[in-house]
Image (spheres, rainbow, N blue to C red):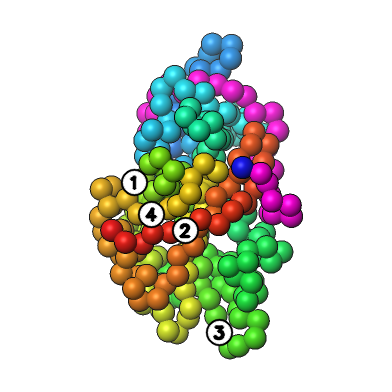
Amino acid sequence: MREEPGMTSLKIGEGLVEAIFRSRPNRFILQCELPGGSVEKVHLPDPGRLKGILVPGRSIWLLPANDPARKTKWSAVMVRDPDSGAYISLNTQLPNRLIREAFMSGELDEFSDWAFERAEYRIGHSRYDFLLRHKERDASLLVEVKSVTMSDGRAGRFPDAVTARGARHVEGLAALQGEYETAVLFVAQRGDIDSITSAPEIDPYFAKVMEEAAQKGVRFYGRVCEVTPTRLTLGRKIPVDTSI
């Protein structure tokens, strides 16, 4: 996929090392073999299942940690899909950073009528990723960003593990519809998919909540990212299928 001129981009890091994934002792720790043969503990910033993505023996790209106080000297950054050849980012914090930059620069045409107001907007006991203000009328838009890594062929799937928190966010958006306008933006940290849908076989409750929220007026958008060993770049729009 070609990178669109002017699209928001984040630098992933310098000095990536290609290693081999061996095992995953827990949600946030991997065992990876470095080029010299040593096996090291590696921090994984994505707590999802990553089924079909983290496969023993597959190459994984690591970033050395700069903090000498950290228990792990490496962080997992990306893997590569063996079929499509696409890199897949493993950092779930990057999409929010990327979308914030895109809102600030006005590069998301699906939100062209809206201006960035603030991030991490709290309503009651809930906190939503972004609050936007309409440029011409008195209206506010709440936007939740969800990171997508799993795919089934050319379709991205969300979530790849049960997410009670994600369901609460979408339920909250549906409940606030009317007082606010509301939307969910799925950001695929890979560039080899053409659509996004729920994964009812993994989390049937989230799939149900997503379908009902769409019926109540919550809007669902999708974007892919172009991932390289140096950058994560916001890419094209893709449709979201909210039906189960």
Q: Residue furthest bottom?
A: 138
Give the foreground label among 1 and 4.
Answer: 4
Q: Residues within 10 Å of mark 1 (few under 14, many from 20)?
A: some
Note whether 142 is above or below 180 in the view shown.
above
Left or right, 162 with reference to 44? left
Image height of 74 relative to 127, above or below: above
Instruction: Measure the alpha-carbon separation of dots 1 and 4.
Output: 14 Å
Residue at 64%, 36% in the rendered image: 228
Going by the numbered disc 2, the residue's amino acid type is Pro
Q: Badge 4 local density, few (<14 within 10 Å), some, or many (20+)?
A: many
Of helix, strand and loop, which one carries label 2? Answer: loop
Q: Quadrant of residue 206?
A: bottom left
Which residue position is annotated with label 4? 197
Q: Secondary structure at mark 3?
A: loop
Q: Residue furthest top?
A: 37
Residue at the (45%, 70%) spot, across then down: 219
Task: Say few, some or many: other residues with alpha carbon within 10 Å of mark 3 (under 14 / 14 to 19 / 20 or more).
Answer: some
Which quadrant is home to the N terminus?
Answer: top right
Left or right of 225? Residue 101 is right
Q: Earlier in the sequence, mark 4 or mark 3?
A: 3
What residue is disc 3 on? 139
Q: Is residue 218 magenta?
A: no
Q: CA distance from mark 3 to mark 1?
A: 34 Å
* Residue 67 x, y percent position in the rendering: 64, 35
In this view, the mark in front (4 or 3): 4
In the drawing, what numbered circle is on residue 161? 1
Mark 2, residue position: 239
First of labels 3, 2 by sequence position = 3
Q: Is the C terminus in the top left, top right, bottom left or bottom right quadrant?
A: bottom left
Query: Mark 3 or 1 closer to N-term?
Result: 3
Q: Nearer the viewer, residue 34 or 236?
A: 236
